[in-house]
Amino acid sequence: MVTPAQISLPPLLWEQAVRTALLEDLGNGGDLTSQAVVPPDRQVTAAFTAREDGVVCGLPAAALTFRLLEDPALGPVTFEAHVHEGAPVRKGCVLATVRGPAQTVLAGERTALNVLTHLSGIATATAKLVREVEGAGPGGKTPAVCATRKTLPGLKALQKYAVRLGGGGSHRYRLDDAILIKDNHLALAGGVEKALQAAGDFARTSHLTKIELEVDTLDQLSEALSFAARQQLEGARYRGADVFLLDNMDLQTLREAVALIARFAPHALAEASGGITATNVRAVAATGVDVISLGALTHSVRALDIGLDINPESGGH
């Protein structure tokens, strides 16, 4: 099992997102309010505190925010994390402390909190779903919980990292990760068999390229399985889809689809997607699917409530 300590992002990916966020927020003149009302020599200590239970994610972004804002004319800033990335925390836990010029701390407050609360929300939601599906499948099988490509522009790497930190995985990171044949591709290619044949021919150019086929009916799945069976009988190297994406199927249809895949394409994975929520994810897992993918983990998750509170007695002139 992968632990949070084994999961990290290169500093460049953190910096790209944080720098962009800071430039958006600072504009052309910086934090006018703090410049106007806070003395430049005022020093403060401020604490990032969890206001609800959750999983922490994004501490490197918070630390980087203040490092990028550090102004030699005002003085240095120090950031000290009190918990590890990926740690489960309780309401009231102090996650980190930042010390330095008040103007610098206030200028970075919103950017640091925006990233920290958003990523912690993703990690928290993912961890909840992972716990929910544990051992829920036939024979105690636990499916993987994965995020889709429905990420916010510019935050893909960070959001996918947060999912991994919460115990989940990834469906696809990018379009060039794999071949995923969806309904529009089927319409343009002329159907399941033509699309699979073309994908198989293309995939031969790279032995690492996997093929996934999205199906929303048992008829489509049966057609794909029949194609794979004929390929196998003919001794073809390509034997059909490596993964079947079972899209928006009800529970009974999912169970039937999983059974068909297990019987006729045991090498392939069954992945459920569409309409999956925290309330029905365990029932979906019970159908026997190998993977459950959700766009909601990244595109509409609720942020974890975290505050940055300045000690009113800290610092001085």
Image (spheres, grey):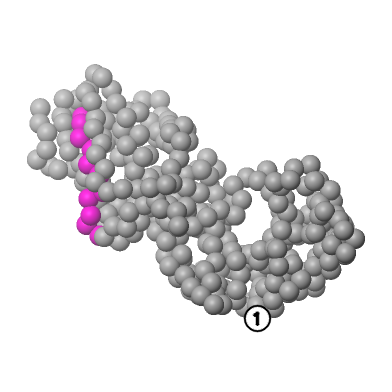
Q: At which x and y percent is residue 223?
A: 83, 68
Amino acid type indicated by mark 1:
Gln
Of residue 17 and residue 10, the one placed in the foreground of this image is 10
Query: For numbered disc 1, what is the local secondary structure?
Result: helix
| Mark 1, other Cα within 10 Å: few <14 / some 14–19 / many ≥20 | few
Residue 159, relative to residue 51: is it above or below? above
Dominant secondary structure (helix, strand or loop) of the stretch shown in magenta:
strand
Highlighted range, magenta = 91-103
Q: Give yes or no for residue 95 being in the magenta stretch.
A: yes
- For residue 127, which quarter of the picture? bottom left
Of residue 201 and residue 58, the one placed in the foreground of this image is 201
Residue under the image location 56 percent in, 77 percent down: 138
Residue ID for mark 1 = 252
In this view of the protein, can residue 93 be seen by the observer? yes
Q: Give yes or no for residue 42 being in the magenta stretch.
A: no
Residue under the image location 71 percent in, 67 percent down: 266
